[in-house]
Amino acid sequence: MEEKRKKVVAFTAGRRGGNCEVYVKIALEAIRAMGIDVEMIRLHECELHPCTDCLRGGCYVKGPEGCIWKDDGPWLAEKFMESDGYILAAPVWSLSPCGIVTDFRDRVFGPKMDLAMWEINGGMPEWAKGRKKMRPGGLISVGGALTENWTSLGMATLYTTTFSAQTNVVDNMNVYQVADPGEALMREDYMRRAMYLGQNVGHAVLNPQIDWERKWLGPDEGEACPGCHRSLMIGKPGRNFVECAICGRKAYISLDKDGNIQYSWPEDNRDRLTMMGKFDHAREIARHTETIYNPHVDEIQDKLKYYRQMEDFTVKAPSRTKKKD
Ligand SMILES: Cc1cc2nc3c(=O)[nH]c(=O)nc-3n(C[C@H](O)[C@H](O)[C@H](O)COP(=O)(O)O)c2cc1C
């Protein structure tokens, strides 16, 4: 029997014909040259309402189709689930990816797609049966600022779309100094990097027998964290360690003889990029509800009535105000 062709789906949140798209198309062209089918979806051309956290009712039990919003959300989730590889590209707006990326993340991923939650809570929900897949992924963040620190939360936030469904990011590229439409083409270094990113994702897609969890195919670009290959650390005064803000991995810090920071990363297989990290998180949520919330639930619900009724100073948006004839 002929083997089913593999497919990589790229989601892009940049302008139509803008810089993100140039790099995505270069990556997809390289992937297609490896015999893999490719698709690109422009998130800004989708109708996508933000998740309202309707207490995980519909979508968790019935899948994305169970969402209260009848828009392109379920179709996007389907596109993700049918893919064998994932690419996400977004421009940086005010340090972070533009807003539709977090709507995309919350509508398509989150608890309903969490592989650990599925296993812990009595197995896969009906809608997800036979659909578990761990995909390799590549992330592209594009900023226009001259200084890299103006892109600080871009890549970090793109990573947050990969946690629940265990998309294994094998490469990421953080672009800066690429601002105006078409400027992407002035940077041959980034164009080549995008081609390599495509080939890296393609290679991982063609070799599903390898466990791609926390495996890196990108170049060594001098980033600190060996897990996510970024350098965004939480370092509190009085501590001798930092935690990676993206994957949560812990490193002990010291200074070398020239006063440069050195990181020492103990062996660890429980950060957010691993299945074990996801299990820890799922257990933590369950433990919290059981031990902290549930014993006080009646008392809390009673007190909450006071604040639920306090509506005299809330103001409705014009779109929510019914017109009077
Ligand atoms: C509202 C807005 C905010 C922006 N903020 C940043 C920023 O904080 N840092 C940065 O590097 N670039 C910033 N940019 C520039 C874009 O990231 C840049 O133009 C990028 O190339 C756009 O990608 P695109 O052509 O794919 O849409 C901002 C652009 C807009 C429209």
Image (cartoon, rainbow, N blue to C red):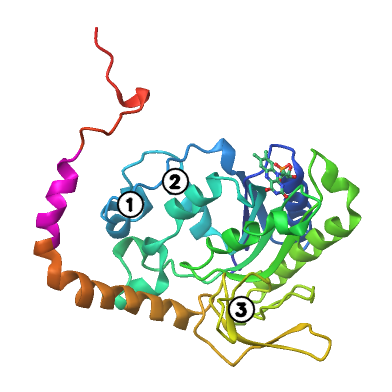
Residue type indicated by callout 3:
Trp
Residue at the spot 88% in from the left edge and 59% down from the top edge: 189
- The residue mark sitting in front, 1 or 3, is 1
Q: Can residue 188 be seen in this view?
A: yes
The answer to whether residue 264 is above or below residue 220 is below
Q: To which residue does mark 1 refer?
A: 53
Region of the chain picked out in magenta, as a range: 300-310
Query: Earlier along the polypeptide chain: callout 3 or callout 2?
Result: 2
The alpha-carbon separation of the residues under discs 1 and 3 comes to 31 Å
Residue type indicated by callout 1:
Asp
Ligand 1 within 8 Å of disc 3? The answer is: no
Q: To which residue does mark 2 refer?
A: 73
Which label number is shown at residue 244? none
Instruction: Locate the N terminus and report the quarter of the image it occupies.
Output: bottom right
- Closer to us: 193 or 7: 193
- Is 309 in the magenta? yes
Magenta segment, principal secondary structure?
helix
Which label number is shown at residue 212? 3
Instruction: Locate the C terminus and report the quarter of the image it occupies.
Output: top left
The alpha-carbon separation of the residues under discs 3 and 2 comes to 27 Å
- Closer to us: 90 or 75: 90
Residue type indicated by callout 2:
Gly
Q: How many marks?
A: 3
Query: Which x, y percent locates residue 181?
Result: 79, 38
- The residue mark sitting in front, 1 or 2, is 1
- Is 180 in the magenta? no
